[in-house]
Image (cartoon, rainbow, N blue to C red):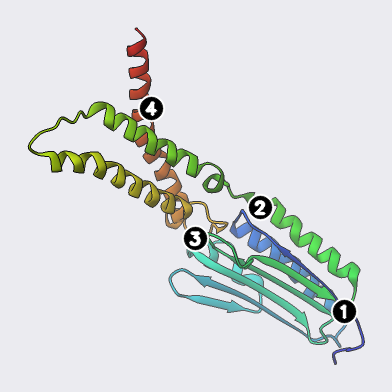
Amino acid sequence: MMKNNIIREKRRLVFNFKRITPKIIRDLSNIIEQEIKSLSTNETIDHYIIYSVDATDNTSFESQSNEIFTENQIIESRVVRKVVMRFYTKDNSKNIEVQMVHLINDENSENFISVSGDEPNWVNGVLSRLSEIINNAENQSKFKDRFSGWIISAVFVLFNVEYFRLVHFEKTQYELLATLYVIGVPILSASAAFGLHAYIEKLWPSVELQTGPEYLQLATKKRNNMKWLMATIFFPILLAIIYDVVKSSL
């Protein structure tokens, strides 16, 4: 029975900018399993446990055992978008919930660890062990927040500077066509810059679940492609400007 006269402590840890691998998922579930085993000495305490996995191919899996996260099984064979772990005793004396969601921007704090219970020492101890695992996860780059805007702006400016340097417009009978070149190209390049920024947003999710075969991990693949794309666009323009500066100084 639930003991209504007891004040329970609840702690919640929200995390962001992390890359969650299958090992991190298994380590988190192992801590919950340890807490379940600690209940076995007291047969009067009933408990509930559920592990769930939602994949991007619209398949979902549930289990009352963390064998759902067994190596080379579900989370290594499918790209996962959400993992949830819930454990609580029927008398509500111990509760643990872990949720991890692959999100571009986690504005609603959907990635969290929540621990509550009758004993503050137990609550703080379990939360500390779980948060240590999250802290050991690889940090997600904040490139999209810190640098992407500057780099895209630089490419936009360099492109238009080089474009107007190379293309000379004279007043002719095709004045409308010339006007389109003068106005249209900067507008199109600005539109491309906005599109590129939106594309980059998806390459560095706030929380990235790195599950499934490597060739299916789209964020990683697209980041590698982006490096080549930026090198192809940015460096030729930059080299052309450097060449012009050196040439004009001679």
Do labels 3 and 2 touch, CB within 8 Å? no
**Frontmost residue, 15 versus 198:** 198
Q: CA distance from mark 1 to mark 2?
A: 33 Å
The residue beneath circle 2 is 137
Secondary structure beneath label 3: loop
Q: Are marks 2 and 4 in contact (CB under 8 Å)?
A: no
Q: Residues within 10 Å of mark 1 (few under 14, many from 20)?
A: few
Q: Which mark is residue 41?
A: 1
Q: Residue at x 59, y 69 (%)?
A: 83
The quadrant in which residue 198 appears is bottom left
Residue pointed to by mark 3? 212
Q: Percent x, y for residue 203? A: 47, 52
Residue 113 locus on image (x, y percent): 71, 67
Q: CA distance from mark 3 to mark 2?
A: 17 Å
**Can you say which quadrant of the picture contains the C terminus?**
top left
Q: Which amino acid type corresponds to the residue marked 1 in the rendered image? A: Thr
- Residue visible at 27% across and 31% down in the picture: 164
Q: Earlier in the sequence, mark 4 or mark 3?
A: 3
- Looking at the rendered image, the disc whose residue lies closer to the viewer, 2 or 4, is 4
What amino acid is at disc 3?
Gly
Estimate the spatial distance between the alpha carbons at disc 3 and disc 1, rounded to whole Å. Answer: 37 Å
Q: Amino acid at mark 4?
A: Leu
Q: Are marks 1 and 4 in contact (CB under 8 Å)?
A: no
> Where, by quadrant of the figure, is residue 93 drawn?
bottom right
Q: Which mark is residue 238?
A: 4
Real-space CA distance between mark 2 and mark 4, rounded to the nearest whole angstrom: 37 Å
Disc on the earlier residue, 3 or 2: 2
